[in-house]
Image (cartoon, coloured by chain):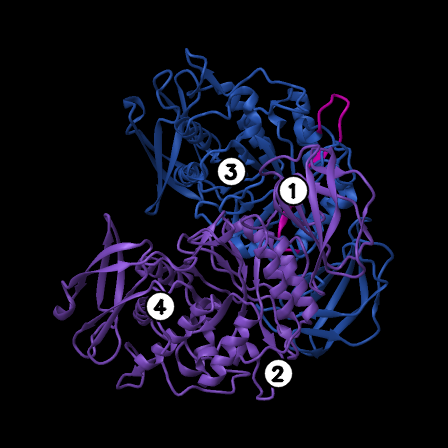
Chain colours: A blue, B purple
Amino acid sequence: MTALPAGVHELSFTGPPQPADPAPLTVTFTQDGTGREILGFWDGGRNYLARFSPSSAGTWRWRTRSEEPALDGLSGEIEAAEPAGPGPVQVVDTYHFAHADGTPFRPVGTTVYNWIHQEPELRSRTLEAVSDAGFNKLRFMVFPQGGGYVEHVPELMPFERDSAGRWDTSRPVSAYFRQLDDAVMSLAGRGVVADVLLLSAYSADFGLDALTEEEDATYLRYVVARLGAYPNVWWSLCNEFDILGRPVQRWDRLGELLARIDGHQRLRSIHNWVEFFDHNRPWVTHASIQDGASVAEPGRASAYRDAYLKPIVLDEIKYEGDVPLRWGHLSARELVHRFWVATVSGCYASHGESFVKANGSLHMVDGGPFRGMSPARLDFLRRILDALHIAGLDPIDKWDDPEYVAGQARRQYVRYFGRSAPATWTFRLPQGHHGERLEVGDQFQVDIIDTWNMTVLPVERTFTLTEVHRNDAFADGPPLLLPEGEAIALRITRRQ
Amino acid sequence: MTALPAGVHELSFTGPPQPADPAPLTVTFTQDGTGREILGFWDGGRNYLARFSPSSAGTWRWRTRSEEPALDGLSGEIEAAEPAGPGPVQVVDTYHFAHADGTPFRPVGTTVYNWIHQEPELRSRTLEAVSDAGFNKLRFMVFPQGGGYVEHVPELMPFERDSAGRWDTSRPVSAYFRQLDDAVMSLAGRGVVADVLLLSAYSADFGLDALTEEEDATYLRYVVARLGAYPNVWWSLCNEFDILGRPVQRWDRLGELLARIDGHQRLRSIHNWVEFFDHNRPWVTHASIQDGASVAEPGRASAYRDAYLKPIVLDEIKYEGDVPLRWGHLSARELVHRFWVATVSGCYASHGESFVKANGSLHMVDGGPFRGMSPARLDFLRRILDALHIAGLDPIDKWDDPEYVAGQARRQYVRYFGRSAPATWTFRLPQGHHGERLEVGDQFQVDIIDTWNMTVLPVERTFTLTEVHRNDAFADGPPLLLPEGEAIALRITRRQ
């Protein structure tokens, strides 16, 4: 059993065996007049737990409410230490993320859908592989996956069955969900966001796609009660929600429920197959979008920023691998290119690997070590992003910049040449609509980034703006020589 | 004075001079238990009018309500004839438009912002030019435009001023709004949609951008009362709304008011400069978007369809002309290309002309005859669209079709080659996610469309599918020879 992550407090209670509602108590924590309501949950037998991550140090008083007399009206207090880590991730500057302490968080994630449904040894190796590769977010499913490329069916299932053989979501299997606890905590220990796919169409083999709305709600309350305190949790309400063919209002109600019951207010999204959810809905904190074509060429994905005014995470842009299906045979070069296109579009993206393995499965299904050539390049990209001086990259002149420069006006920029491979570059920056205007005399340092060979070469020269026009600005002097080949980027930083 | 369009009924009343509210009465029309509430308005002196377009023939009873005793409790009936024309335009099939009688409407519009604020002769010449060129929608402003390229300031202004010199929206100038009536009716007479820009930042020179929310609402009620009965009206709440810097909630409230008070339920949109409005809001019937880059390359604009699930009208994709500012010097070829890109993206677009005229103005400001080469090609495009057998063009395989084929599965398709100019084409259709699947043996007729030279050449050969795969389908036989040059399209129609 993995230890609770730093900052997570757990209260234990004793109550009736087998409650009617598996999340039958509410615990209100208060400090200085601020209150937060947390669901408590049944953990098997007569054991009940409530988990809480205080947002500030000091004493928090708590009190329970429950229909179960044994769980009602209990009270006490906890002593919270100063936060040990950077804290949970929140949305900042409309399109970006940062930890509670202000440290920017740039998601460069991967996908192992069926991770937690493998034997323990493979689970551990996946965790290590993901973390060692530098991925900082992992998409995985709570429910087991069925269908193609699934070569292992777990023994544990999330719920007991009722007398008619239907899943009874009011009777969760504690051992199953303790395994989920462990998975999330082990990611927390390595600083990786657990992008928890709460529902999906892929669990149809087990009938877990056919719960009623009420059953979904019971399950949702339970899983939020269990996991919500972990600081690395992001909720994805459903993977490819539109495959399930439910009315969109049902998803909307479930999303609103999620926002209402989650006292920790972890980030919330819902992920599409072909039809989009309305990511403008208030309960959606960031748009999680499947659209491989959006980053196949520059100039596309930024439309989603305009439409949703939220961070855009392109959680499926096709995979590096060799399966015959067209979602799963990108070359590593192509996938890395797409990440850089996403980057200068002001968006984030997710990786996955789909080489057919010796066992017939894919890494994106069951995990294990990576085989592809993209993870190292994506780690390099993440390190470039983490070294930025600014909160995030925004397209500077989104409707008129054929060069796709992103950054923050007059501070720092990234330019990505993509599939073109010019021998030289003449210093030019677009002005853009927002932020400070460039001025004659502004000085810039340029670094040449080889996104494939993973090198950063500082240019030994300062670029000083000599011409500033309405829409762009130029520096005098000979053009900059660029290295041969595609996929070169520039980091352009103003000297202060 | 132009005659009322067919189907529009006008009731006259006598009431107090100068009411506190210029739209002080509500008239409820009922037929067979169905009721519709229409605002009546003050037309100067002691004259009040209420205009109504019944949605069905036969007797409609009416009754007034008003705070003004002279206008309250009046009643009567009108006899409505069978609809004479195709009726007002509505949204159909999520992304498209059709008249009430089912006739598809494919907007190919143009823009003359300051049209109604010119001398009568120029106004008439503009009307003729727009209509003769085949444009079926015209964007123009209710309030006069100031600023660059405006060479004529009208004498008439929309409101009286109060004693402090502020515009008093409760005292509209009847002569001004009769002129607006005339403008809309003259467009109706030629079958052109009046895309009425209710507010804009361009009226700042006259202080008309600085009304309070309450004043906006008074004006909105008045103009809806005056124009709502005309079957060719579309409302655009504001042109480039985000220039005005108001809280987005204020626009949302005004949009909701518009939806609530318009008994005729004309189409409603709001148009942006740099920041987008949330076109998912329920009161928005279609997204009116300024984004020149969205159609500079294929594969972009369709993102807006996914985001908004409504018709997308790209009401500003830059203009054909020669002004130095970058929004106004597209070549005709480039503008026509952008319209075709919009078309195979499943979207619609608007034209405008920005050659500097002898008087120092631009066609898109004050009108007159067209000088550019795009209008004829856009008329050709509109005729191609009107000849389609289907409601509209939808990207068939939006995330994986590098050839940008749009249409309706297994019925009719349009393929646009854009800037590539292949000598031959091998028959291929993508399957797509929706609708019927292609089958071996399906037979197709192909027409070669030269979008610039405006020719349609039927191919004297039937293409029969011989191979149908998971994602696409092919017809045997030698490749089709294509004419030389860019901007060729194909219309591919299944033989029934």
Task: Establish if B102 lies above or below A350.
Answer: below
The C terminus of chain B - image quarter = top right
Dot 2 crowding, Cα within 10 Å, few <14, some 14–19, many 20+: some
Secondary structure, mark 3, is strand
User: Which chain does the numbered disc 3 sit on?
Assistant: A
Closer to the eye: label 1 or 4:
1
Q: Position of residue A7 (x, y in %)?
A: 49, 38
Q: Amino acid at mark 1?
A: Arg
Closer-to-camera residue (A238/A248): A248
Q: CA distance from mark 3 to mark 2?
A: 55 Å
CB-based contact (under 8 Å), mark 3 and mark 4: no
Residue B402, percent across and down? 72, 48
B46 drawn magenta? no
Determine the CA span between mark 4 and mark 2.
32 Å
Residue under disc 1 on the same chain as residue under disc 2:
yes
Main secondary structure along the magenta-highlighted residues: loop
- Residue B494 shows which numbered tag? 1
Judging by the rendered image, the residue that carries numbered circle 3 is A235
Q: Which comes before the other along the chain, label 1 or label 2?
A: 2
Q: Which portion, as a residue range, is magenta?
A: A345-362
Residue at the (60%, 36%) spot, across then down: B436
Q: In which quarter of the view is residue B234 placed?
A: bottom left
Q: Chain of mark 1?
A: B
| CA–CA distance in space, label 1 to label 4 | 43 Å
Of badges 3 and 2, nearer the viewer stands 2
Q: Tell me how far mark 1 sits from mark 2, CA to CA.
A: 46 Å
Q: Residues within 10 Å of mark 3 (few under 14, many from 20)?
A: many
Seen from the viewer's position, the closer of residues A71 and B136 is: B136
Q: Which mark is residue B356?
A: 2
